[in-house]
Image (spheres, rainbow, N blue to C red):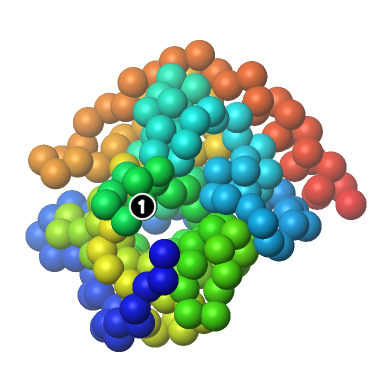
């Protein structure tokens, strides 16, 4: 899908009268992915995070329920899950590589076409801005091509899937249109231990 370049101003922070979630400075490391082309977004997200979530990108949010924590606050190493739309019927997933501020993040992802970018290419450090009314990241615009001052149309998202298990004692808060509600919890993901081992190896190198 080729996107037209649309210059936009970066959004200001949301209305201070509306309660805003605190920015997370934590998160999890992103695993190295040596492949730079010929990938769709799902296998790239799996390789970069170690997450074991099945299905097309449009199914990740629902399939992660009970295995991975989910919410509407960005953190490094989490996966931003886009909803399916007319021009993106299979949805999209992208890995958060940096949280810049309450309205801006950088993502690493694959198979997002644009000016000078081929289908299947891996792009890193792509700017995404939150344009939702309540700063809950349910509506975003993504950098077009290599120009970090131009953004495409508004896309709807479910939120962020965190690279940690959803389990008792770790209650996540998910921003909604009418405030916050608790996300259901379930059994830990069997893939978490593998990711933690790989993370420890990376820090030891």
Residue 72 makes an appearance in the image: no
Q: Position of residue 32 (x, y in %)?
A: 74, 53
Circle 1: element type:
loop
- Pick whichever, 87 or 5, lies toward us: 87
Give the residue drawn at x 43%, y 49%: 92
Q: Residue furthest right?
A: 205
Query: Which of the 4 image quarters holds residue 16?
Result: bottom left
Residue identified by numbered label 1? 88
Query: Which of the 4 image quarters holds residue 154?
Result: bottom left
- Pick whichever, 42 or 30, lies toward us: 42
In this view, 191 is above or below 110: above
Residue 38 makes an appearance in the image: yes
In this view, 180 is above or below 205: above
Q: Position of residue 116 (x, y in %)?
A: 54, 80
Query: Which of the 4 image quarters holds residue 184?
Result: top left
Give the residue drawn at x 49%, y 30%: 55
Give the residue drawn at x 75%, y 42%: 199
Q: Position of residue 45 (x, y in %)?
A: 58, 46
Mark 1, Cα crowd under 10 Å, few <14 / some 14-19 / many 20+, is some
Location of the N terminus (image quadrant): bottom left
Using residue 203 as the reference point, say whether residue 92 is left or right of it: left
Q: Position of residue 41 (x, y in %)?
A: 54, 50
Using residue 160 as the reference point, say whether residue 183 is left or right of it: left
Using residue 19 as the reference point, say whether residue 152 is left or right of it: right
| Count of numbered tags | 1
């Amino acid at each position: 899908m080729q996107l037209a370049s649309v210059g936009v101003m970066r959004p200001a922070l949301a209305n201070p009268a509306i309660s805003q979630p605190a920015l997370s400075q934590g998160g999890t490391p992103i695993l190295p992915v040596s492949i730079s082309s010929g990938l769709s977004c799902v296998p790239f997200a799996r390789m970069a995070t170690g997450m074991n979530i099945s299905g097309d990108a449009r199914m990740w949010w629902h399939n992660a329920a009970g295995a991975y924590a989910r919410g509407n606050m960005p953190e490094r190493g989490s996966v931003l899950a886009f909803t399916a739309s007319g021009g993106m019927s299979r949805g999209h997933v992208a890995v958060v590589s940096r949280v810049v501020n309450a309205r801006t993040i950088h993502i690493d992802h694959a198979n997002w076409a644009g000016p000078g970018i081929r289908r299947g290419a891996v792009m890193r450090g792509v700017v995404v801005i939150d344009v939702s009314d309540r700063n809950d990241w349910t509506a975003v615009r993504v950098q077009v091509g290599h120009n970090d001052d131009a953004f495409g149309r508004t896309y709807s998202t479910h939120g962020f899937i965190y690279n940690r298990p959803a389990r008792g004692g770790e209650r996540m808060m998910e921003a909604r249109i009418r405030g916050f509600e608790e996300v259901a919890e379930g059994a830990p993901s069997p893939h978490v231990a593998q990711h933690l081992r790989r993370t420890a190896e990376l820090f030891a190198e």
